[in-house]
Image: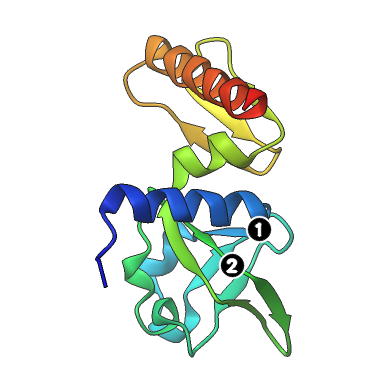
Amino acid sequence: TRDLSVRQVNLIKLALASSLYPNVAVADGANQNRGVADAMFITPRKPQANMHPTSVYGSAPSLVGPTDILIYSQLLETSKTFVMNATKAHLLPTLLMCSSDIDTNRGTTRLLIDNWIEVHIAGGGKVGEKILYLSQRLRQCLASS
């Protein structure tokens, strides 16, 4: 068998994300102050969810950094809400390609994605404008093929 390249793996993750969106989660910024079992993840549907203990991210939530997003298959509701079957992907490209609504501030330094998550763009407004332009062009190319 042949190993997949990083590029091929990222393309598979993007395809997975586009089929499961909005089943995505981000790590709560306060996780560094919590125990492993208490790590929280924020989803569009549930503001507080735990990673299922059988998940690799359930035993090592520190693997999910601030520029990562988890794509998951389902939320399991018990006494807690658990994220199930998660795969890590790059946050910004995933959101830019899968979201249905992107709002920005006047300087294009902040993006509000689907009225759920705010992304700060380092490098100022020109970088934000370029990111939005390129994501729009890529979406147009994909829609026309």
Residue 66 can be seen, yes or no: no
Residue drawn at x 43%, y 48% as measured from the top left = 11
- Decide: is 114 above or below 122: below
What is the quadrant of the C terminus in the image?
A: top right
What secondary structure is found at the residue carrying circle 2?
loop
Residue visible at 45% across and 18% down in the picture: 128
The residue pinned by badge 1 equals 20
Choose top left, top right, bottom left or bottom right for residue 124: top left
User: What residue type is disc 2 on?
Assistant: Tyr
Residue 82 visible to an observer of this rendering: yes
Q: Can you say whether 92 is above or below 54 in the image?
A: above
Q: CA distance from mark 1 to mark 2?
A: 7 Å
Is residue 58 toward the left or the right of residue 137 in the image? left
Residue wearing tag 2: 72
| Front-most of residues 101 and 50 | 101
> Which residue is painted at 45% across and 21% down in the image?
131
Image height of 45 relative to 7, above or below: below
Q: Residue at x 47, y 13 (%)?
A: 129
The quadrant where residue 140 appears: top right
- Residue 6 appears at what percent x and percent y? 27, 52
The answer to whether the residues at label 1 and label 2 have Cβ atoms under 8 Å apart is yes
Which is more N-terminal, label 2 or label 1? 1
Q: How many marks?
A: 2
Q: Secondary structure at mark 1?
A: helix
